[in-house]
Amino acid sequence: MKSSLDNSELIYDTEEISEALYLKRYLIKVQTKADKISDKFVMIFFVVGIFLAPIYQTWLFSFITGGAALGIYLVARFLLSNKFYARMLISIVYAVFMLQFIGQMHGMAETHFFFFVNAALLIIYQDWRIMIPYAILTVGHHSILAILQVAYGMENLAYYFISYSGIKITGETVPYVTVFQLVFHFTIVSIMAVVCGWWAIIFRQNSIFLIKNKMEVQDKNKRLLVTEEELRQNIEELEAIQNKLSLINREMTYSMEALEDKNRIIEEKNSNIEEKSKSITASINYAKRIQEAMLPKIGKIKESLPNSFVLFKPKDIVSGDFYYFHKVESKIIIAAIDCTGHGVPGAFVSLIGNELLNAILDKDIFTPSEILTHLNQKIDKALQQTDLSIRSTRDGMDAAICLIDSENNILEYAGAKNPLVYVQNNEMHVVKGDRTSVGGNLAKKQQKQFTNHTISIDSTTSFYIYSDGFQDQFGGEEDVKYNTTRFKQTLLDISTYPFSEQKEVLTTIFEDWREQQDREQMDDVLVMGFEVSPS
């Protein structure tokens, strides 16, 4: 029920968007046609101004005012990207032309019809707002002339504004514009602007109403066509179904008994599969307990390294990654190891690797490079990788092994592909491991050599070793790998946090990255961090 409601809401939103886009395109067409009409009238107004110039001896006034109006119009039409602002400028252009004619004809009362003509032209834009600058400019122009007339006694302004020298009021000639006349003209201007603006609103509403009706008719026609096509297809399908029904009915009678037998067999197999699945899951869960027993206890690690954490997230029930910890007197061996694969196969290899490390350290071999060399030899032997028998495998492991020597204030490191990252004095350093894995030789007789690196502990230093599970996880906004560069930057960022919070911060970052695309965990994840201070 919820899904159907969501679909209907989606269709409704889509129809609203489509209607809005259609109306927008229509109004753009209306305004484009209005612009073409305005192009003609602006040129006509300019020519009329030139025509009136010799009659009223206003050549300079005509060219300056008309040219300015024409220039503003060209800017509005071809340079302004915002069409609303362009229409506001066009409104001003119409007002300038109207005032130009009043000025050229020295205020002949008949020229006031230009106000209504120009306002009527603005109606075609179907936008009442463009009447505002037109009316404001007209009222402002008349007001300025009236104020100048009163303030400076400029009698000639009466001839510019409206020539009342021939009009008698109470038997006297009125050379100046009175307040009554000014208010009267303002009232006429306001009424005409409001009427034209109201007509623009009516035209726009009628246009929208007609467009919506047209869209509804088109939509109904499309739906009728679709319905007719669906009915035709349904009739054809029904005819075909009817032809097959008789045959199917005959076959069904013979098939029912066979289906019942098959269902009984399937139920028996499903029951067997469920039992085996439970048994396998129980075995894997038991293997998990064995693997957890093999791994060093976090409390034991914290006894020697109080500022430390282990982020261990197996992809499956058991893991192909494992961490190692061993302390001998003032020396600590700590390692993060990534075995081939994950799940049960990886867990088997991790058990082998853990036991081989124990055997190597029992021989008092503590140098990380030597540990990797011996581990490589023992993996080759344990998995029979020195010959090409059917039973041999390419399984191996990538590793980062560290030796903390508290007496000498140094840390030794060797890596099989996996690096060591450490932050000292707020600066990150990366020590790359050798470009070879432990094991996986398959009859290659050359002896692998691993490089030993020594780092001085001159100040409190944070160290990080890890498998590739974190950085290979897909997710994020673009559904890409977290990658090595981003992961190293994350380690630098969290190094400022207390070690008691770093694991939780890393876990949150990993889960947020994965969940942005609802991705499953791609691989086992292992990150170890620990702090070492000079003694």
Image: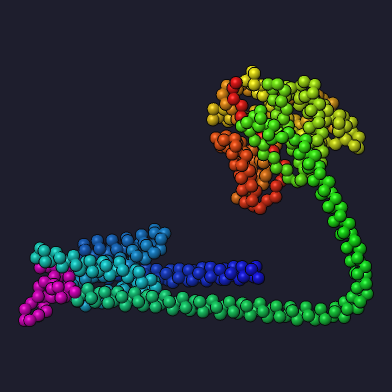
Q: Quadrant of the C terminus?
A: top right
Q: Residue at x 59, y 25 (%)?
A: 533
Task: Work out whether residue 227 or residue 312 is closer to the camera in this orientation and state it.
Answer: 312
Q: Give the x, y percent position of residue 281.
A: 81, 49
Magenta range is 155-183
* Visible residue check, residue 315: yes
Judge left or right: residue 246 versus residue 301. right
Relative to 311, say whether 101 is above or below: below
Q: Give the x, y percent position of residue 295.
A: 75, 35
Relative to 396, say whether 412 is above or below: above
Judge left or right: residue 488 versus residue 358. left
Quadrant of the rendered image containing residue 246: bottom right
Judge left or right: residue 410 versus residue 352. left
The stretch drawn in magenta includes residue 167:
yes
Q: Give the x, y percent position of residue 493.
A: 56, 37
State the scheme by which the image is colored: rainbow
The stretch drawn in magenta includes residue 153:
no
Residue at the extreme top of the image, as rendered? 408
Q: Residue at x 37, y 75 (%)?
A: 200
Report the number of numbered marks: 0
